[in-house]
Image: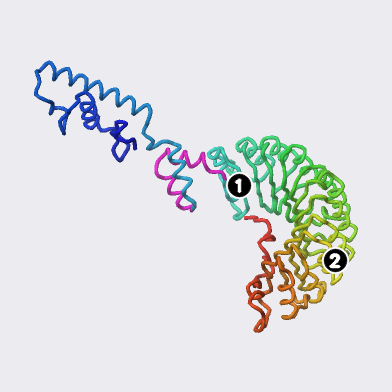
Amino acid sequence: MVGEDEGAVWNTLGVIEPNRLRQRAADVADSQPQVGAVNTLPSVDRETQTEVKKNADAGVKRVGEYLQRSHPPKLGCDDLVAQILNKISESEDIRSFSEVCKQWLRVQRLNQTSLRVDVGFPQILLTRFPNLLELRVWEVTKEKPSKEAWYPTETGLEIVAKSCPNLETLLVSSEYSVLGSKGLRALGNGCPKLSTVMFDEMVVGNEGLVALFQAAHNLKGLHLSSNELVSDYACRAIGSSCITTLELKDCPYVTTDVGLRFVANGTTSGTLKKLILDGCQGITDNGIEYLVKMRCLEHLELTNLSEGVTDVGGVAISTIQTLKELKLSEALGMSDRTVVALAENCHNLEAFALCLWFHGDVSGASICAFSGHKCLKHLALFGDNIHLSDVEVERIVLGCPSLESLVLDDSVVWNFGSMQDRARRVIKFGSYDRPLPHFTGTTWW
């Protein structure tokens, strides 16, 4: 609201009040105006009163034009509505917001950057949200196909490419969909800002991934889950890219020693920072040793590996000096030798999660090798095959000054009656499937 010294005549709704404008102009025109309306002028002749009134009317016009020009009313402005929208976080409240009027609905659509829908949603939705940055689509119901519905096909990806030019993240989960090179190439060309692609339970072949990497020049993250068509051939294209994150889960033919060799010897050796391999039964110690060539690798997760990965591969991992976060789960052939090598050689390691329920065997003595570590902040230990006593737990906590949390299995009964207070404060209990915030996994929904 404008101050009175500037001729402020706005009311609480931001509307100009003519009577106040007239009084303000009269006050300006007469050096000693009476309190009240403009009609209460000093006792002068009629000609003088007429002249003053004319000046007052002119003043009203001039002040009104000035205020309209320099302080336009903002109520109903798209920018103001957008500011209100930014204060709302709950999805139900946002829906209510869009139902106020057509203008608010239009502003809400222009400002919406994320859309999460089921397979078979109306295609017209994509045109209504032109500024989408994230699109997540997953298959929930099996409804009868419709011409107006969107499905993860070659044509479906072409529609996304035309409707969402600013798209940065695409997640599609559909069990019976087949994607080839045409649709994925169109996606890469039509969405130049595309940086993260996640395909779950989809049939994506080698040619499709090759076309995607050829077209999507800003792609930084690739997540594939439950894919049996992609093989090591696609790893050649992956290795020639500049991605920083690669997650392969239950892709039995893409993650073998040959595939890891392509990734480690390509340009990704200098760009890849996060690597997650889950259920990759084709990897052996030879493939793990290729990872030593990764010059920027900071985050590594190896889960459900084959018996071909032993302490040889574990010791090789310990030589990756850039490693900061490491998770080993159900590492069949790894033992104390691997743990000790990690504690002694991974000087920059900040988070380590070890989960051994059915395979592997690690003693508390090897875990205690971390008691002298200088950088370790978070340690998580789960599984019946990790043999750790209460005394060893306290030794690890007190001997590692940088340790902020030691997460132990909440299903195991521990006796910490005589433990020091400092050690008590560091120990926490959790679930093995989410041992640390650093290893929460990809959100597929």
Give how far across and how far down residue 109 sits, in percent.
50, 41
Which amino acid type is shown beneath numbered disc 2? Answer: Ala
Quadrant of the snapshot with the N terminus: top left
**What residue appears at the point 82 percent right and 72 percent down from the top-left corner?**
360
Quadrant in the picture for residue 378: bottom right
Where is residue 361 shown, x and y percent of the image? 82, 74
Crowding at mark 1 (Cα within 10 Å: few <14, some 14-19, many 20+): few
10 Å neighbourhood of mark 2: few (<14), some, or many (≥20)? Answer: some
Residue 318 is marked as none
Asked if one can make out residue 248 in the rendered structure from this viewpoint, the answer is no
Q: Which residue is mark 2?
A: 341
The secondary structure that most of the magenta stretch takes on is: helix
Looking at the rendering, the stretch of residues picked out in magenta corresponds to 90-113
Q: Tell whether position 211 is magenta.
A: no
Looking at the picture, how far across and down is residue 34, in whole percent?
Answer: 15, 31
Q: Can you say whether 26 is above or below 367 in the image?
A: above
Measured along the vertical axis of the image, is residue 316 above or below residue 236? below
52 sits to left or right of 198: left
Checking the image for residue 145, the label placed there is 1
Towards the viewer: 168 or 96: 168
